[in-house]
Amino acid sequence: MTFKDHFSARAALYAAHRPDYPAALFSHLAGIPANRNVACDCATGSGQAAVGLLGHFRTIVAIDASRSQLAHATRDGQVSYVAAAAEQIPLRAKSVDLVTVAQAAHWLELGKFYDEVRQVLAPGGALAIWGYGDPVLSDPGLGAIVHDFNRGTIENYWAPERMLLLDGYASIPFPFRETPQPAFTLTREWTMAELGGYLRTWSATAAYVAAHGEDPVVAVERALAKNWGPHDTRQRLEWPLYLRVGYA
C-alpha cells in the first residue's frame, strides 16, 4: 500500500496534540445524507473526525493507510478502524451514507478517491471534506512568533499540497452536486506546551528535523515564553474550517 506518509513517524504526537472538531460541525453533517446508517471517515489519522461522528450514525468505519496512526487512534467500540487507503475503500457498493475526509484531502489521489466514493455511496449519500489552515492566536505578539516560524523557519519544508489547504480547497476538483455550507471555526484554549506539541505534528516540522537533526520548535517555545505568562496560562487559538459537501 503506497501513500504520501508524512505522519507515521509522529503518530503519537499527532494523536496527543491534533485538535478535534466542533460538535456543531457533526450535528450539521448528520443532517446532510438521507439516512444515518453508515459513515466512513477516510484518511482518519488518529480518528479525530471518526469520534466526532459518534452518536450520529449507527456504524462508523474509519480507514487510514498508516498502521502507525491507527495504532494511536482513539478507541471506541462504535468505531471500526481498518488499515486501507482512501483510494481503496473496503466497503460494499451503495452501503455508505456519509463519506468524510478531515484535514487530508490534499494528500489523496483525488480522481481515484472520487471513483471509490461514487461506488460506496448509498442513494441520498454525500461526501464531506474539510480542513483548516494556519492557527490565529488572540495575542498578536504570540501570533507573530508562530507565523514567523511557519512562514519563515519551516516555509521551505512544506509539501506543495499544502497550498491546496491554504486555498480552502477551493481549487481542487469536486465533481459532485455541491451544496452551500455554513461557516465553522475550530477554537482551543491551549497552554504553551500544548501549542508546542501541535507545532511538532506539522509535516514541515518533521521535514526540518529530518534535514537538520534538531527540533526547531524549541526556539519557538523560548520566544513564546517571554510573553506567554505562567506555564499554565491558556491562550486562545482559532482555525476557520473549510467545508465542501456534495452528492453523487
Image (tube, rainbow, N blue to C red):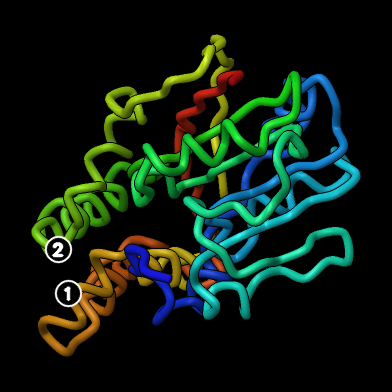
Q: At numbered mark 2, what does the secondary structure look like: helix, strand or loop?
A: helix
Residue 139 shows up from this direction: no
Q: Nearer the viewer, residue 203 or 137?
A: 203
Which residue in the structure is indicated by mark 2?
Answer: 157
Farthest residue in the bottom direction? 213
Give the amino acid at mark 2.
Tyr
Please rate how many residues cluster around mark 1, counting C-alpha atoms within 10 Å: few if below 14, some from 14 to 19, many from 20: some
Say whether disc 2 or disc 1 marks the residue closer to the N-terminus.
2
Against 9, residue 148 (above or below) is: above
The image's mark for residue 76 is: none
Q: Specify the quadrant that holds the N terminus.
A: bottom left
Task: Estimate the x, y position of residue 94 in percent, counting from the top left.
Answer: 73, 34
- The answer to whether 55 is drawn above or below residue 225 in the figure is above
Which image quadrant for residue 93?
top right
- Quarter holding the C terminus is top right
Residue that label 1 marks: 208
Locate residue 198, reporting x and y percent: 43, 65
Residue shown at the point (47%, 35%) measured from the top left: 114
Label 1 element class: helix
Given residues 11 and 88, the one toward you in this image is: 88
Q: Is residue 150 visible?
A: yes
